[in-house]
Structure formats: structure tokens, C-alpha cells
Amino acid sequence: MNPFKAAGLALNVLFLASALTALVGYERSRGLPPPEEILPVLDSDPIQRKVNEPPFEFDYRGTRYTVTPVARYELRGLVVTHNDIAALSDIYHNEESVDFRDICVIWGDNVVDSFYQRLSFWSEPWTCYVQSKSSDDWRQFEGSQLSNNHLLTNNEQVQRAVEQAHIGDQILLRGMLVNYAPSDRPSFLRKSSTSRDDTGNGACEVVFVEEFAVLKPYQPRAYSLLSWGTTMLVVTGVLNLLAFGALPYLEYKFR
């Protein structure tokens, strides 16, 4: 076979293999783990304790923030959705946003029966939502055992750990419920909820994260396949575009 045609064929095969790998990873990563895989520690409500600590400041990507601690906070939950500050649909956040991720979790009665696997969860820039097509499933759902957590931290290792958590992971989060604002614009204050029973605007917890761990990951191999396949799909796609123009020229030049 002509070596240039063989090279083009090989690139096409690699492109299709990458697409298949990404698709398999995506399909396997969908959904939530069954109740029998839920850890017993998720049965407990978050631990919250009032504090009387002074405000402090920290810098994040060129902006200084003033943070006022409200309560010590510890949460164990199942990640059901999270936002993506890099998504085109989120016009309120970017890579400079100090609230670098929202993580929405459920726990307690919401994870003891398989009904939560039939609920639909999704995130928007400031809020997470849940929906059900079944009135029976909806009656079982306990709204006070779901929380959307706006996360910030001054620890790069903690931030990387949070960013690597996926939907379906069971996580531990420790830190403080806080109110915060840019130090030079104190009127731009964002306040944390201190109750799991409130709803609507202001109902989210704002957490200054000091410790974060994935207690039990969900489908880690699937996410590896998705990441690897997506990366190779981009690489082979670019190579195919370059080859589309270059290979005919090389074939003509060296025939």
C-alpha cells in the first residue's frame, strides 16, 4: 500500500478508536452507585458548630478576599452533580473565580434506597436542581439532606483534590462555613447558609475547605477512559486535519 495512504488510514483508525474509548468511558461513568455501595458514614447529617473566630484575608489569583468564619463544618455525602466554571453556559465564573467549584451532595435517608438513582440532578452557575418523574420517588426525597456547596480554599492541594472528584464519588469535606467578599469591595458580600432546611436564593453553603477526601470513588476506570479518549480524540482530530492537506501534497511530491 502507498505509505501516505497507509498513514492516512492509520490516523483515521486512531481517531475512531479514540472516539469509541471516550464513548465507552462516558457511558460507564453515567449514573450513581447503588445503595449497597454507599458507605455507612453517609447516614449522618453534617456536623456544624458555631465559632467565634476573627476574619482573615487571603489572596486568590491577584485578588485579596476577606473571609468571616461562621461555623465549623464537616460533611460526608454522595456527589450527585457539580458545576463547571469553564463551561460556556456559565457566564458568571471563570478561571479567576475564588469559588472554584460547586459540589451538590446528598446523604442520610436519600441514599438508603435506590430511588435516588431514578432522580435527575443537574447544576447551573449558582444552584443545583433535582427532578423526578415519579411522585412516589419524589415523596421519598428529603430536601434537607441535599446541599449545594460553594467551595473556596487557599490550599492548592485541597483545590486539586476537589477538582478531581466526580459525580458518584462519596466524599468527606471539612472546613468552615464563611461569609466572604473582595477586600476592596466589601459590599460584594456572599453569605453562607447555616441551615439545611432553607431553599432558594441564599440557601447554599459557602465552605472554606481545609480538608477534602474521596472516601469511595465511583467508576474511576470509566473516567480514565473518558479522559484519555477525549484527549486522543482532539489530538488525532488535529492530525487528521493536517494530514488532509499535507498527505496529498507529499504523495504528489514523492511519487
Image: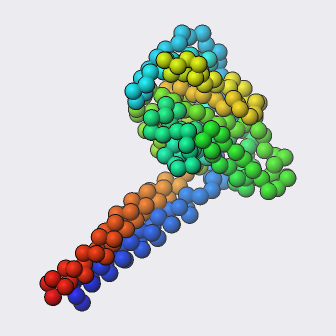
- Marker count (numbered): 0
On the image, the x and y values in percent for residue 171 come to: 56, 39
Looking at the figure, which quarter contains the C terminus?
bottom left
Residue at figure coordinates x 19%, y 79% from the top left: 250
Q: Quadrant of residue 111?
A: top right
Whether residue 221 is visible to the viewer of this picture, yes or no, is no
Task: List the single residue furthest toward the left.
Answer: 254
Residue at figure coordinates x 78%, y 40% from the top left: 142
On the image, the x and y values in percent for residue 137 come to: 81, 51
On the image, the x and y values in percent for residue 52 come to: 60, 9
* Relative depth, front residue between 103 and 201: 201
* Relative depth, front residue between 104 and 9: 9
Whether residue 70 is visible to the viewer of this picture, yes or no, is yes
Residue at figure coordinates x 32%, y 81% from the top left: 9
Q: In the displayed structure, would residue 27 be above or below residue 86? A: below
Q: In the displayed structure, would residue 254 be above or below residue 196? A: below
Residue at figure coordinates x 76%, y 30% from the top left: 198
From the viewer's perspective, tell me whether residue 255 is left or right of residue 103.
left
* Relative depth, front residue between 44 and 54: 54
Q: In the displayed structure, would residue 215 be above or below residue 208? A: below
Q: In the displayed structure, would residue 50 be above or below residue 205? A: above
Q: Quadrant of residue 13?
A: bottom left
On the image, the x and y values in percent for residue 6 come to: 27, 83
Looking at the figure, which quarter contains the N terminus?
bottom left
**Colour option used:** rainbow
From the viewer's perspective, tell me whether residue 4 is left or right of residue 89.
left
